[in-house]
Amino acid sequence: MRKKLTLPTATTLMMTVIVLAAVGTWVLPAGQYSKLTNDNNKRFLITSSSGSVAVPFTQATLDSLSILIPLEKFTRGEIGKPISIPNTYQAEKKNPQGFIAILQAPIKGIIESIDIALFILIIGGFMQIFNNTGAMFTSIKHFAHSMKGRERLLIIILTFVFSFLGGSYGMDVESVIFYPVLVPLLLAAGYDLIVPLGVVFGGAGIGYIASFSNPFSTIIASNTLGINWLDGFYGRVIYFIVATTLFTWYLLRYAAKVKRKPSSSLVYQVDGNAGSPFDLH
């Protein structure tokens, strides 16, 4: 019997990346950029392999270093971590990492990024508890049943709901549990399998792209770069509204075409096989 292929665990992937990084220290050229650090809004510190130099805490200093960032972002604390200075890359002597460094890397990584690790732990725990209670699933199931006969309005509302969930906390593949809830309802209304797929996955995907407050692709990434995650927030919200509106319009247009002419469905040959384990009728 052929052995079933299994995917590696997260720990296996992490250790593989660490080993590859360690191998890279032996074969790749070493070097780094000089770093600029805000010293309590009094001065800037430029740190390089040769040491640290203090420079005035002014916009002129940033401009002279080709750092296209307003000084106000430093004074307001929106940028807290050292940033790389353009055109300052310097080659350095290699510092190959061995077996002991590989074993120490996960521990050092957790210590140096404990704020991010705890944030992921708290957010992940909250969402796991929230999903296990069944509160979200039950609410959407009840709402879908109550909207029978008003499916176009249901498409609009749920597309925006899933888009909001994707943009706010990063809902993505976990939205699959809602697909079988919508399938029988929307098929009965004369639509095809693409419509509930668009509502669930399309909505969540559009919102995830916007990620106006997604803790993973926005907040954690911003913290890693040392910038305020609220920078550009309103732009992301505007994109979320515009993109979700356009996607919903396109989905409604497609749904109306399928309802008017079923043979125009992209999945016309398999629509009759759709079903759901949940009784909504």
Image: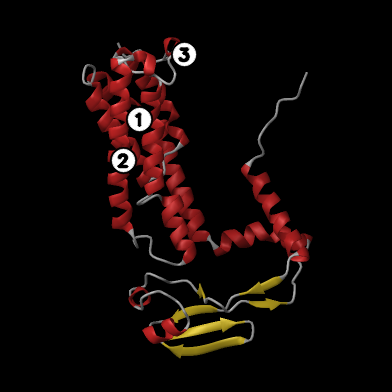
Between residue 202 and residue 212, name the one nearer to us: 202
- Which residue is rendered at x = 41% and y = 43% of the image? 126
Category of crowding for the residue at label 2, using alpha-carbon neighbours closer than 10 angstroms: few (below 14), some (14–19), many (at least 20) = many
Q: Amino acid at mark 1?
A: Val
Label at residue 199: 1
The answer to whether the residue labelled 3 contacts the one labelled 1, judged by CB atoms less than 8 Å apart, is no
Between residue 182 and residue 272, name the one nearer to us: 272
**Residue ID for mark 3:** 270
Q: Amino acid at mark 2?
A: Thr
- Compute the Cα span from label 3 to label 1: 19 Å
> Sequence order check: which comes first, mark 2 or mark 3?
2
Category of crowding for the residue at label 1, using alpha-carbon neighbours closer than 10 angstroms: few (below 14), some (14–19), many (at least 20) = many
Q: Is residue 20 left or right of residue 35?
A: right
Tally of marks = 3
- Which residue is rendered at x = 28% and y = 45% of the image? 242
Q: Is residue 97 visible?
A: no
- Which residue is rendered at x = 21% and y = 21% of the image? 150
- Compute the Cα span from label 1 to label 2: 11 Å
> Sequence order check: which comes first, mark 1 or mark 2?
1
Vertical side of 168 occupied by 72: above or below: below
- Measured as percent of width and height from the top left, residue 45 is found at 49, 84
Q: Quadrant of the C terminus?
A: top left
- Measured as percent of width and height from the top left, residue 160 is found at 29, 37
Secondary structure at badge 2 equals helix
Category of crowding for the residue at label 3, using alpha-carbon neighbours closer than 10 angstroms: few (below 14), some (14–19), many (at least 20) = few
Secondary structure at badge 1 equals helix
The answer to whether the residue labelled 1 contacts the one labelled 2, judged by CB atoms less than 8 Å apart, is no
Secondary structure at badge 3 equals loop
Q: Quadrant of the N terminus?
A: top right
- Measured as percent of width and height from the top left, residue 91 is found at 69, 77
Residue 203 figure quarter: top left
Vertical side of 88 occupied by 53: above or below: below
